[in-house]
Image (spheres, rainbow, N blue to C red):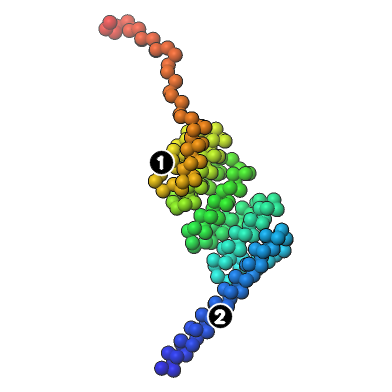
Amino acid sequence: LIAVLAGIGGWQLWRGEMLKAAQRQSDAFAVALQQAANGDIDAAKTAFEPLLTRGPQAYRIMAGMEHAALLQSQGDLQAALTEFDTIAADARDPVMRASAQLRAAYLVADSQDFQAVQARVQPIIDGGGQFSFLAQELLAVEAWEAGQTDIARDTLENMRLAFDTPQSVRQRAELALAVLGPAPAPAADEAAEPARQPTEGESK
């Protein structure tokens, strides 16, 4: 009985400490967010940095997302991209992972070629969920700008027809398809291939 009571007391003590740690993490996160909202970017970055490596993982991931966004706002795109990639690799929650992957894909779209963007968005699309539609939309836009109109048209058409596409995304896909227009018809041969004349020895 004493051992059971001691175990319960120890568990309650541990749980209380975890709740206090989460509360401290939450308070520090709120302060850093407020500093960012006030435009004090350097102070916000400094406030977020300790939160990247301590406390519950959910807060570490959220702090990383905010810290990477601040790096992006200051033009340090490579550092922001590296941080988003780290978050995507570490996140156990699929929504957090897809969010970080999509943020990284947007950065790549501003600085790299279409193939790099396509490689970034494909895992998000394959994973399904609501982020997959935003990834498809980014893929279609980048394909269109790169002259890959077949990929753009097919992607937009898939978004238009999917029953679970969010209405706002479906409307944008329909508008883009109207501007892009239908696929061109195959060009007809300008002239029929002349009939082959039989060679000597062949039956006429």
Secondary structure under tag 1 reads: helix
The residue beneath circle 1 is 161
Whether residue 31 is visible here, answered yes or no, is yes
Q: Is residue 114 left or right of residue 47?
A: left
Q: Is residue 169 left or right of residue 28?
A: left
Query: Comparing marks 1 and 2, which lies closer to the viewer?
Result: 1
How far across and how far down the image is residue 119, in percent? 52, 45
Category of crowding for the residue at label 2, using alpha-carbon neighbours closer than 10 angstroms: few (below 14), some (14–19), many (at least 20): few
Q: CA distance from mark 1 to mark 2?
A: 51 Å
Secondary structure under tag 2 reads: helix
Q: Is residue 195 left or right of residue 140?
A: left
Q: Are marks 1 and 2 in contact (CB under 8 Å)?
A: no
Q: Which mark is residue 17?
A: 2
Q: Residue at x 40, y 44 (%)?
A: 162
Q: Residue at x 56, y 44 (%)?
A: 116
How far across and how far down the image is residue 27, in percent? 62, 71
Q: Amino acid at mark 2?
A: Glu
* Mark earlier in primary sequence (1, 2): 2
How far across and how far down the image is residue 85, in percent? 57, 55
Classify residue 56 by image quadrant.
bottom right
In the rendered view, tell whether residue 203 sits above or below residue 73: above
Q: Residue at x 58, y 74 (%)?
A: 23
